[in-house]
Image: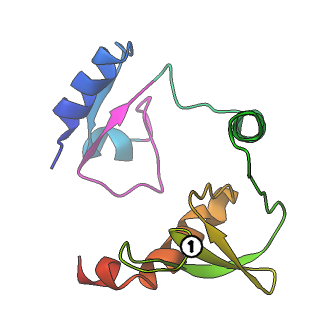
Amino acid sequence: DVGLPQLVEYAKKNGVHDLQIVSKEDIADPYSTVYEPSVLCTGGVFSPSTGIVDSHAFMTSLVADAEENGPSISFAFNCPVKGGRVIPINSEEKGSVVLYADGSEISCDNVVIAAGMSTDKIASDIQSSCPSAKET
């Protein structure tokens, strides 16, 4: 279990030196610089210089890297995913994840879910169908 101070130390090792550990009172205080009215927590880390990502540019970069480095890369863009399942390591099935998408099953070795605010729901749907995920 990694605590907030350890996360701050990891960040420093990666060149981020302006992180601040903040209390739940700081986060709940409307006059605080870290005020977040929708967050219920016991504390957090404020990072004034990181966290903004151009997600479209990031995904475009991932696609370019994959196409450049993979001989048999397939993409399923703008494809509604209805869940999936994790393939057990000892299975003879190909791939490590099967996605149920757009009326088909797509077998994958690696999956990048770029679904904005729905990403956690899709990941949870895949996890919930994995027996080992239910046990942990």
Q: How is the image coloured?
A: rainbow
Q: Residue at x 53, y 68 (%)?
A: 123
Residue 23, image x and y in percent? 24, 39
Q: Residue at x 60, y 59 (%)?
A: 111
Q: Amino acid at mark 1?
A: Lys
Q: Per the image, is 95 magenta?
A: no
Q: Per the image, is 33 magenta?
A: yes
Against 75, residue 63 (above or below) is: above
Residue 22, image x and y in percent? 28, 34
Q: Residue at x 22, y 23 (%)?
A: 9
Circle 1: element type:
loop
Badge 1 is on which residue?
A: 94
Q: Is residue 51 left or right of residue 9?
A: right
Residue 89, image x and y in percent? 37, 72
User: What are the residue bounds of the magenta stretch?
Assistant: 30-47
Callout 1 environment at 10 Å: few (<14), some (14 to 19), or many (20+)? few
